[in-house]
Amino acid sequence: MRIEYPGKVSEAELWDSVAAARPKTKWKVEFGGAGGGAPEGRLLYGDNLPILKHLVENRSAVGKAKVVYIDPPFATGRAFATRDGMVAYHDLLKGGEFLEFLRKRLIFLREMLADDGSIYVHIDSTIGHYVKVVMDEVFGPECFRNDITRIKCNPKNFARNAYGNIKDTILFYSRKPPNGASDSTTWNEHRLPLTPEEIEKQFPKTDAAGRRYATTPLHAPGETRNGPTGQNWKGMNPPVGRH
């Protein structure tokens, strides 16, 4: 599927129309490296579209990025200020103009991703469903991994007939599609081991060998049903009034 809008260009037109930024001292800041303890890195400051074109054209970053995370504007049509009242940034692009702004950058970022790399795009519920279609086009729908919900606040009592807007969305894509057991995408398990206190709370019982476990009822409210839930289990029937 593709999403069409005025001003959308082909990838060939994009490569021809964007002028690569020339390396400038003011947008290159080195940090870390050998002996410093911190990882080696570089901060680039400026319009990211010509900078991305420069990095891709010079092959210095092609296929090198393991993870890309971007938090673009949300096409709100508003200007945002800092806490002291200074203008932080303008989020004035909307509709197709915004989608094309983002799509152009996604195309260059795709070229920078390693074969085992991933990209995360932080967006909101207003424009996120359109961005999903754009990312399907750029990366391929088979590379979509997850739609991650980020809870950002408690519900508010807005004066409107709707639920409170409490979440953003993070779209997670890989550079290569999964291929069964041979999925090459790097994945670092995010779960932490349980603490002794958590183990004791979640598994309060102990068997003869000292192994901790928990029990969970296999029955639910409601009279006997037809099908498997209405039959006995290992010679046992559920309590009266349950199945």
Image: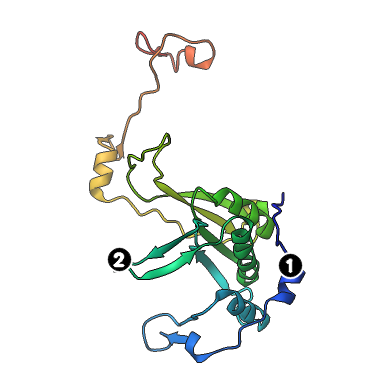
Q: In the image, what residue occupies the spot 39% across and 46% down?
A: 166
| C-alpha span from label 1 to label 2 | 40 Å
Seen in the picture, residue 235 relative to 210 is either above or below; the reply is above
Q: Is residue 130 visible?
A: yes
Residue 204 is situated, as x and y percent measured from the top left of the image, at 25, 36
Say which residue label 1 marks: 11
How is the model colour-coded?
A: rainbow
Front-most of residues 66 and 205: 66
Front-most of residues 182 and 168: 168
Q: Is residue 210 visible?
A: no
Residues marked 1 and 2 touching at CB (< 8 Å): no
Q: Amino acid at mark 1?
A: Glu
Q: How many marks?
A: 2
Q: Quadrant of residue 218?
A: top left
Q: Amino acid at mark 2?
A: Arg
Relative to 228, 55 lies left or right = right
Q: Quadrant of the C terminus?
A: top left
Q: Nearer the viewer, mark 1 or mark 2?
A: 2
Q: In the image, what residue occupies the spot 60% across and 51% down?
A: 130
Relative to 39, 214 lies left or right = left
Label 1 or label 2, whichever comes before in sequence order? 1
- Badge 2 element: loop
Residue 30 is situated, as x and y percent measured from the top left of the image, at 45, 87
Residue 220 is situated, as x and y percent measured from the top left of the image, at 39, 18
Relative to 148, 217 lies left or right = left
Q: In the image, what residue occupies the spot 54% across and 51% down?
A: 128
Q: In the image, what residue occupies the spot 51% across and 79% down?
A: 46
Say which residue label 2 marks: 83
Q: Which mark is residue 168?
A: none
Mark 1 Cα within 10 Å, few/some/many (few <14, many 20+)?
some
